[in-house]
Image (tube, grey):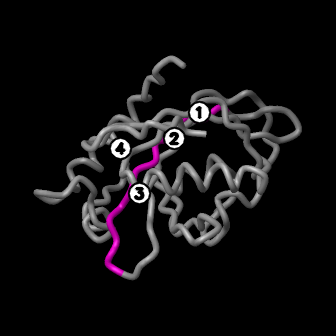
């Protein structure tokens, strides 16, 4: 596997996430993230809450909603691709438990492949008793055509862990 180069907008997102960390903590709090969320970063953001069996979108930035051509707030990240749930949840849990980041490259599907995307996923620190959360940004690498509404179905192309200060997991992302 070759290293995935992070797109410039996602490198900016990662740098912003790092700036939200408090001294002595490798992961920012949800509150710290929300307090420092700026327009350009918010436009590309997703915030996801993990349940025991699923990942539910809590916030979707308007640039992402426009790119997807629908608002996924309140829906499962896997609503159009339930067969990816088990594998995806393994990666999401690793992001939170290790903690680390994750870069993904995927293709959103419709009648034909439509959009190639890159995303970065990063953990957020939550108060005791609260469900784990992840913040993410997604950028379209290339639009392959069609004005048709995208299907909430996607194919994972590549994944890679990001060391955010505690090393990367030994297990490869799935």
Disc number at residue 105?
A: 1
Judge depth for marks 1 and 4 and give the one in front: 1
Q: Residue at x 57, y 29 (%)?
A: 141
Residue corresponding to mark 4 = 13
Distance between the alpha carbons at the discs numbered 4 and 3: 21 Å
Q: Residue at x 80, y 35 (%)?
A: 146
Give SS at disc 1.
strand
Q: Which residues are magenta?
A: 116-128
- The answer to the question of whether label 1 and label 2 lie on touching residues, with beta carbons closer than 8 A, is yes
Label 3 neighbour load within 10 Å: few <14, some 14-19, many 20+: few
Residue corresponding to mark 3 = 97
Which residue ends up furthest to the right in the rendered image? Answer: 111
As rendered, which of 166 and 18 lies closer to the eye?
Answer: 166
Q: Is 74 positioned to the left or the right of 50 in the image?
A: right
Give SS at disc 4.
helix
Sequence order check: which comes first, mark 1 or mark 2? Answer: 1
Predominant secondary structure, magenta span? strand
- The answer to the question of whether label 2 and label 4 lie on touching residues, with beta carbons closer than 8 A, is no
Distance between the alpha carbons at the discs numbered 2 and 4: 10 Å
- The answer to the question of whether label 3 and label 2 lie on touching residues, with beta carbons closer than 8 A, is no
Sequence order check: which comes first, mark 4 or mark 3? Answer: 4
Q: Is 149 positioned to the left or the right of 54 in the image?
A: right
Residue corresponding to mark 2 = 119
């Amino acid at each position: 596997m070759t290293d995935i180069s992070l797109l410039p907008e996602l490198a900016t997102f990662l740098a912003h996430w790092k700036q939200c960390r408090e001294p002595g903590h490798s992961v920012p709090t949800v509150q710290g993230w929300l307090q420092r969320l700026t327009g350009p970063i918010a436009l590309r953001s997703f915030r996801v809450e993990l349940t025991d069996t699923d990942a539910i979108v809590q916030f979707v930035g308007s640039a992402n909603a426009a790119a997807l051509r629908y608002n996924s707030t309140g829906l499962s990240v896997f609503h159009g691709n339930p067969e990816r749930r088990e594998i995806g949840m393994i990666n999401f849990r690793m992001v939170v438990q290790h903690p680390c980041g994750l870069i993904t490259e995927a293709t959103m599907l419709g009648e034909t492949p439509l959009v190639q995307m890159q995303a970065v996923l990063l953990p957020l620190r939550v108060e005791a008793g609260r469900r784990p959360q992840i913040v993410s940004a997604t950028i379209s690498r290339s639009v392959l055509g069609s004005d048709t509404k995208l299907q909430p179905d996607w194919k994972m192309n590549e994944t890679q862990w990001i060391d955010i200060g505690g090393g990367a997991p030994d297990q490869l992302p799935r």
